[in-house]
Image (spheres, coloured by chain):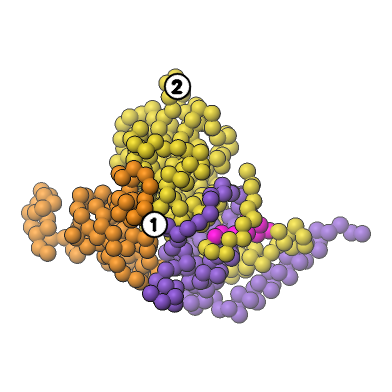
Amino acid sequence: MSQHHHDHDHDHGDGHGHPHAEIAQTGMPGYYEIMETAVRELLVERRLIGADEIRRQIEVLDSRTPALGAKVVAHAWVDADFRRRLLANGRTACEELGISFYDDTQLIVLENTDEVHNLIVCTLCSCYPRPVLGLPPDWYKLKAYRARAVVEPRAVLAEFGTIIPDDVEIRVSDSTAMVRYLVLPRRPDGTEGFSEEQLAALVTRDAMIGVVPVTLTAGHTAKGALQ
Amino acid sequence: MPSQTAAHGGPFAGIVPADGEEPVFAPGDAVRIRTLSPVGHYRVPLYLRGKTASVEAVIRPAAVDNEEEGYGRNAGARRHYYRVAVPMTAIWADYRGNPADSLRIEIFETWLERI
Amino acid sequence: MTATEQLMKRLPNDIGGLPAEPIQRVEHELEPWEKRCHALADVLDFHKIINTEEKRRGVEALGSEMVGELSYYERWLAAFANILFQKGILTPGELARKMAEVEARFAEEAADRKPCP
């Protein structure tokens, strides 16, 4: 799903999706990779950090994908007691399922209903529930989404193909400090006989950010999925 | 501010919490987000300065002020963050949508004043 | 408010509510160095060598031109370097010498990978 972006937004954007254009041309890592390597090696040489700590943290990051969040959502759909605990304290409920919060954040889970639709953004940077969803997509970190989600959420949602009826209340959560947010989407109609695994396969990353609903058609792949 | 404990109704009388241990605001409180202009680092976006809000929840545990963390302070005085709700129509004069639409955000205690 | 006052009062990352383009749903798989950069940020925070909030402040302190032009992890790296200098953990000269060494090593490795004519 690498749709590299070429916007050269000179106003707070996050341009340059190609940090490695250089390596393709010269066979050599680029300036920033050299800098990353140099900073890391200096810190390791001085025993301020361990090389194994970086390797371990990469494994931690790789183990966090939207498939985890999808399992949490599906479990909440089938287990009313768990759903209650999840809405009361997102972090401890996820920890029950073995999902650790390595980044010291709290988690508030926001339930979408036929009366309320929740949408998550971080206007100041890129706060995101990384322990349960992995790293955020580029569009979540770019100016357009961050600038507009708090002022015209309905128009932003429409650009994702999501039309929220006027009588449904929208709550936009701007994530800024120690709390991260996860949307508990509505369980789609027609899934009454589904197993928890089948339900989890329907839940996408974008549905847990609140930009799209969960539908019977748009599931994610077994790998963990970007959409 | 003595005897906050009574209000919190623990089983033992006479316990005095340290400064900052107990949240100053409670769910339902009406507050105003202060109009301040910190230099260098802040986590209260400009679009919310001076807006009135209602406290939805106290965020626990109490934490170090993130403006101070930004300059390397990792421990020390802790206060609470509060998740507050602000109506969209109170933020944006020309907001288009349901009048009940709202913005929710966590704000550090020092940024809130009771109204 | 004067223009320079505005520069002091609005951090370059504080963009909520500003006019912006339609959303382009772009995403890319992280390059290996970007993933390592993210892991480095986490490890630096675990040790409180550079905590998360310092990293954010370090990015903001790059100023609006750098914030606008550099990619996400390029900004993080630039912030790490500046903060490590400010804390006296590294000096600009040490980093420059290490970067020259790493660049020479990479060039050697690239040459070794080239097939013999």
Q: What is the total number of numbered labels drawn onto the structure image?
A: 2
Residue designated by label 2: A190
On the image, which quarter does residue C75 sit in? bottom right
Q: Residue furthest left?
A: B13
Query: What amino acid is labelled 1 in the image?
Result: Thr
- On the question of residue A205 being in view, the answer is no
Q: Is residue A188 left or right of residue B50?
A: right
Q: Is residue A101 above or below residue A75?
A: below
For chain A, give the colour. yellow
Magenta span of residues: A13-20
Mark 1 belongs to chain = A
Name the quadrant of the N terminus of chain A: top right
For chain C, give the colour. purple
Residue designated by label 1: A176
Query: What is the x, y in percent for residue A76?
Result: 38, 33
Q: Secondary structure at mark 2?
A: loop
Query: What is the x, y in percent for residue C61?
Result: 48, 71
Query: What amino acid is labelled 2 in the image?
Result: Gly
- Looking at this view, is A174 or B69 the one in front? A174
Chain that the image shows in orange = B
- Looking at this view, is B102 or B3 the one in front? B102
For the residues labelled 2 and 1, the Cα–Cα distance comes to: 37 Å
